[in-house]
Amino acid sequence: MSLELKKAYRYCKAITKKHAKSFYFASKFLPKQKRKSIYVLYAFCRHVDDEIDKAKIENESHAIEEVKKWQESLEKLYNDGFPSGSNDRINLVLLAWSDVLRSYKIPLSLPIELIKGVLMDTHVKRYETFDTLYVYCYRVASTVGLMSCEIFGYQNPSALKFAEAMGIAMQITNILRDVGEDAKMQRIYIPLEDLKNFGVSEEQIIEGKKDDNFIRLMKFQIDRARKFYKEAEQGIPILEPDTRFTVFLASRIYAKILDEIEKQDYDVFNRRAHTTTAQKLLSLPSLWLEFENFKRLD
């Protein structure tokens, strides 16, 4: 491995460690090659998403141009077989990505779909129904699960539908955790039809007012996310054995964010629910036992 490629892999690992603590924690249980490849996948997704996050406070048109540069560089990589980015960050990630593609068949359509989802944040600030939100969740999260599946390995293509469900579960979790932060930027991801059904107005979300109606709305959304987690975990036995615990762990740790929202009495306006490293470590023995029971039930 060249020094430049080693540098690229180290860069992707550092990005994952800094920005995706739960993801990084769970990945520790993967075999080395798969773990390194997952870091590259995360680094790519993170950088593309960061361009749009910057647009929320800087220049939106500039961010769109930056995202399109990632897409153009990615397409060139798939078509020509070598990376050609417009700056060092893109080159490092795509250099590592090109190496990952030597071992795993990740179709170009998946990262392109991810880019489409990220770009939705530049012009969509409301979702009328869950069906329309599902499209967004699929693009920005299920695509990550589907790409991960190609690295994890699976024994049957049916694993892909469960990976899609895992992405939906995790993105709903993100949405519920970030209600307050998104509201400050005039964004509401919870479907408007759900707000109406529970008697919660858009103004109430933007103003950060929690009442009984809002709590009932959050309970409904949390229940929806947990159903997707439950569905997704049905696909774990179809994955290659050396990746199953990692996916189980990632699912359970991320779902604990929902538990934290409940513990803080659904106040997502003043506190950002999260799990600490200590909580993750302390939960390992019980999660391992749950995993062993999970395997026996299967």
Image (tube, grey):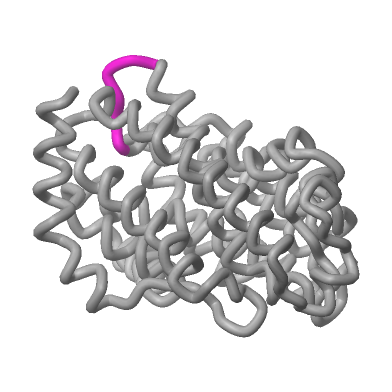
Rendered position, 256 above or below 110: below
Location of residue 238 (image quadrant): top left
**Residue 90 placement, left or right of 18:** right
* Camera-nearest residue between 64 and 273: 273
**Residue 22 placement, left or right of 80:** left
Who's the residue at 38% across and 32% down the image? 150
**Residue 31 placement, left or right of 137:** left
Who's the residue at 57% across and 60% down the image? 174
From where the camera sits, is residue 37 visible? Answer: no
The percent position of residue 187, horizontal first and vertical second, equals: 81, 65
Rendered position, 218 above or below 154: below
Rendered position, 247 above or below 263: above
Q: Which residues are magenta?
A: 152-157
Q: Main secondary structure of the magenta part?
A: loop
Residue placed farthest to the front in the image? Answer: 212
Location of residue 197 (image quadrant): top right
Quadrant location of the N terminus? bottom left
Who's the residue at 56% across and 71% down the image? 88
Who's the residue at 63% across and 84% down the image? 270
The percent position of residue 263, horizontal first and vertical second, equals: 44, 71
Residue placed farthest to the bottom in the image? Answer: 270
